[in-house]
Image: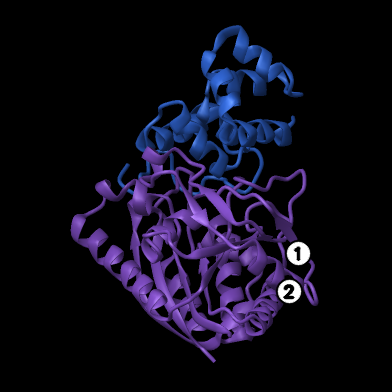
Chain colours: A blue, B purple
Amino acid sequence: MSLYTMQKFLYTLNREPEVQRSYGKGGAVRDSLLAAYDLDSEEFAAIRNGDIGKLYVLGCNGQLLMHFAPLLGIPWADYLEAMREGVRKYGPVRAGIYAMTTGTEEKVAGV
Amino acid sequence: MSLVFAGVCSHAPGITGRAHLADAGVKDEFHRQFHRMGEELRASKPDALIVIAAEHFANFFMNNMPAYAIGMADHYDGPIEDPKWLGIEKRKIPGSAKLSQTIIREVMQTVDIAYAEEWRFDHGIMVPLNFLTPAYDMDVIPVNINCQGPPLTPLHRAWTFGEALRRACDKVPERIALVGTGGISHWPATPDSGKVNEAWDREFMNRWCANDREAMLSYTDEETYREAGQGGFEIRTFVTVAAAARGKGEVLHLKSIPIFAVSCTAATMSVE
């Protein structure tokens, strides 16, 4: 488990246009980019696949994910739903301070 | 001169980025009060604006996280977010390295802080500026309090930091405005987004308006996390402003707008 490293990558990605370009190329370029980070297979796959739900459950800070989502082209409502779906599929948030306190079918803001 | 204006406000990105999703009347009333706060700020004729924000891993990360940091540059860039997502275009924001350095030197007499000669503003500063100084024609001195990655600075240290900022403002010839951003209760960027604790927010703002130091400092992080969410940790910026202003507060707006994910707050405090 290397929550710190996952979040460090997302921090770097959110800040650096060149990293965004490399990630955006996908495939081998994306894999090579991620290989520089000490991630286990689950973490690697979650970032590689842009799996917001898995990243949320693994404990990634919401502020980092909130900016990763538009980079992936995910609208706000879909971003919130992706996290709910992550909890449905993978269980409760495992680490960090962004745990979910509402139900998976609850939509506090209507979205 | 001295401190000439003090206030606090929300900084949630939805305030600008999701404005189109809110009830128009509710959104317009909040924006109107936010602009009113800006008019009061500008009427105090400040030479510079100190914005105490709780940024969100835009400039500072857990490899080297300062409890407090102050910007020290002649200009800054922002927003770091996607402009379409935030609803604010990218631009340069003026600063004053010289004034920053003078303030930093005085603050350091009593509080150990970090300083930064580059800073890319995130929504914690850009959303307030959008309403307070919409022409982006006032020198801004950014301040960050770590409210994001525990362990967090204790509330009583945030108060001491506010006292140091006031002392620094009093020693410079420039007229300084001070605004704290963030809070109050909220669970942002999670599926809980939109949830607030209105009773907790009203009680906190009562304590803030009364400038009741003991009552504001009596919150524990455990209680805040339970009752006000991780976003509640941002009360540190409000505490710092109260310590600096020494006056009494007036709430211009305090109402939850769920699609904005916060109790949308705008308040001023007299400078005593």
Q: Please name the amino acid that badge 1 sits on.
A: Ile
Q: CA distance from mark 2 to mark 1?
A: 8 Å
In the displayed structure image, the side of residue B177 where residue B61 appears, left or right = right
Q: Seen from this angle, which residue lies furthest bottom?
A: B272
In the displayed structure image, the side of residue B24 where residue A69 appears, left or right = right
- Quadrant location, the N terminus of chain B: bottom right
Classify B120 as above or below A29.
below
> Residue B256 versus residue B246: which sits nearer the camera?
B246
- Quadrant location, the C terminus of chain B: bottom right
Q: Position of residue B97 (x, y in %)?
A: 65, 61
Q: Position of residue B175 (x, y in %)?
A: 53, 80
Chain at tag 1: B
Classify B222 as above or below B108.
above
Q: Please name the amino acid that badge 2 sits on.
A: Val
Dividing the picture into quadrants, the one containing residue A47 is top right
> Which residue is denoted by mark 2 in the rendering?
B107
> Which residue is denoted by mark 1 in the rendering?
B113
Query: Callout 2: helix, strand or loop?
Result: helix
